């Protein structure tokens, strides 16, 4: 029997993306139009500009995704779209495009949670084994999510202040580095040495929550002190020391949670999972355990629509469809 083909759309932040995914595991096309250069000038994502560029790109990106997959709308079984969380104006462009296509072509509509998407990006590479733990680290999220079966998400830890990616972006700004900060700090850290002993926020014993705002403040204070004393600032050493602190806490808490919940698989998901030090450190910490570690290839780490199609496949099989009243939900909980 043919497996379902889903056309997926993602516009929650600054990437306009469309993809066609077959059976939840096979990627037929994956088109991402990034707006990064537009927002870079402003040092962060400007919501109004994001919406405007999504409008310009959305139909082109969808057409390209269908063309590259060599499928027509008639061969598509459902339309999936990120309904939240994200920037409301940005989400609305994707949601309206998806509703229009679903109505015009009489196809079922599926609303997908952005974080479920980041997790399911991994299923395009490797079948899931439950119980499964996901470390979700992006610009807006830092969560440990336990899954006992498909589509079932229990948050066992989350950030109490900044998300990990947000901390990267803020530290980059303090160092006068471009947006987004993650990839730049990742590269600089590679060239530097851990010469500063920045704090690691473990919180109460047994807690799987995170906190990165204290670390961010410590880094910013250190930069101010160096400036005041007219001492040279080694951006590479600050980046290396900051990154070591973030990675230590992420990896250790993830390891402890994986042990406590006896999981069979660990997934790392979201933009920060592109980080080289995090990828290496997770692999090293889990080596010798019988927990399968899955970290997506780089092109599936940051926002894309392939992951939305992969997550939507589970909802398709469970007949979890949305009505044409589907709306953007900027604060949607998983
Ligand atoms: O998942 P994503 O593309 O968008 C959100 O849903 O937020 O994640 C973007 C975040 C940004 O904060 C960016 O700085 C961070 O992921 N990021 C990285 C790296 N690549 C992207 N952080 C650390 N190291 C990287 N290599
Ligand atoms: Zn994301």
Image (cartoon, rainbow, N blue to C red):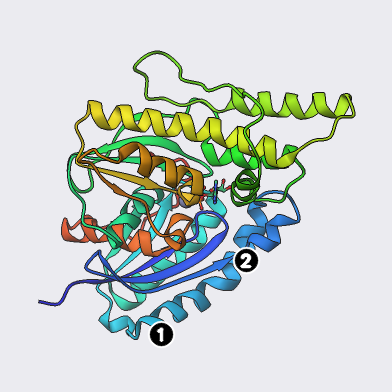
Residue at 50% x, 44% y is 277
Residue 118: percent from left, percent from top? 38, 51
In the displayed structure, 306 sits above or below 144; it is: below
Q: From the image, tell me which residue sits under label 1.
A: 67
Residue extending furthest top?
Answer: 204
Task: Judge left or right: residue 54 versus residue 152.
Answer: right
Q: Quadrant of the N terminus?
A: bottom left
Secondary element at tag 1: helix
Residue 152: percent from left, percent from top? 22, 42
Name the foreground residue: 173 vs 281.
281
Residue 222: percent from left, percent from top? 74, 25
Residues at badges 1 and 2 in contact (C-beta under 8 Å)? Answer: no
Crowding around mark 1 (Cα neighbors within 10 Å: few <14, some 14 to 19, many 20+) is: some
Residue 217: percent from left, percent from top? 67, 25
Residue at 59% x, 51% y is 183
Residue at 67% x, 52% y is 46
**Whether residue 118 is visible:** yes
Q: Quadrant of the C terminus?
A: top left
Q: From the image, tell me which residue sits under label 2.
A: 53
Residue 158, picture quadrant: top left
CA–CA distance in space, label 1 to label 2: 21 Å
* Nearest-to-viewer mark from 1 and 2: 1
Badge 1 or badge 2: first in the primary sequence: 2
**Whether residue 334 is visible:** no
């Amino acid at each position: 029997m043919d497996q379902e083909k889903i056309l997926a759309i993602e516009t929650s932040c600054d990437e306009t993306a469309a993809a066609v995914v077959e059976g939840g595991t096979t990627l037929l096309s994956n088109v991402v139009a990034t707006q990064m250069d537009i927002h870079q000038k402003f040092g962060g994502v400007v919501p109004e500009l994001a919406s405007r560029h999504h409008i310009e790109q959305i139909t082109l990106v969808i057409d390209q995704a269908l063309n590259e997959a060599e499928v027509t709308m008639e061969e598509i079984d459902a339309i999936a779209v990120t309904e939240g969380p994200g920037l409301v104006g940005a989400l609305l462009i994707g949601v309206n495009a998806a509703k229009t296509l679903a109505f015009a072509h009489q196809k079922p509509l599926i609303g997908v949670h952005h974080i479920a998407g980041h997790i399911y990006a991994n299923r395009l590479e490797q079948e899931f084994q439950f119980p499964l733990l996901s470390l979700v680290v992006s610009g807006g999220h830092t969560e440990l999510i336990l899954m006992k079966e498909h589509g079932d998400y229990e948050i066992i830890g989350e950030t109490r202040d900044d998300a990990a990616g947000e901390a990267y972006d803020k530290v980059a700004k303090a160092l006068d580095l471009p947006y987004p900060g993650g990839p730049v700090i990742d590269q600089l850290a590679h060239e530097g040495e851990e010469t500063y002993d920045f704090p690691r926020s473990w919180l109460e014993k047994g807690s799987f929550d995170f906190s990165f705002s204290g670390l961010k403040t410590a880094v910013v204070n250190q930069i101010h002190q160096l400036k005041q004393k007219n001492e040279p600032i080694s951006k590479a050493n600050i980046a290396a020391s900051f990154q070591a602190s973030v990675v230590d806490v992420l990896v250790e808490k993830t390891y402890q949670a994986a042990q406590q919940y006896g999981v069979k698989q660990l997934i790392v998901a979201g933009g920060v999972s592109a980080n080289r030090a995090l990828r290496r450190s997770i692999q090293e910490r889990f080596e010798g355990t019988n927990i399968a570690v899955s970290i997506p290839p780089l092109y599936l780490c940051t926002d894309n629509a392939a992951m939305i199609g992969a997550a939507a496949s589970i909802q398709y099989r469970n007949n979890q469809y949305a009505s044409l009243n589907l709306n953007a939900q900027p604060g949607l909980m998983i």
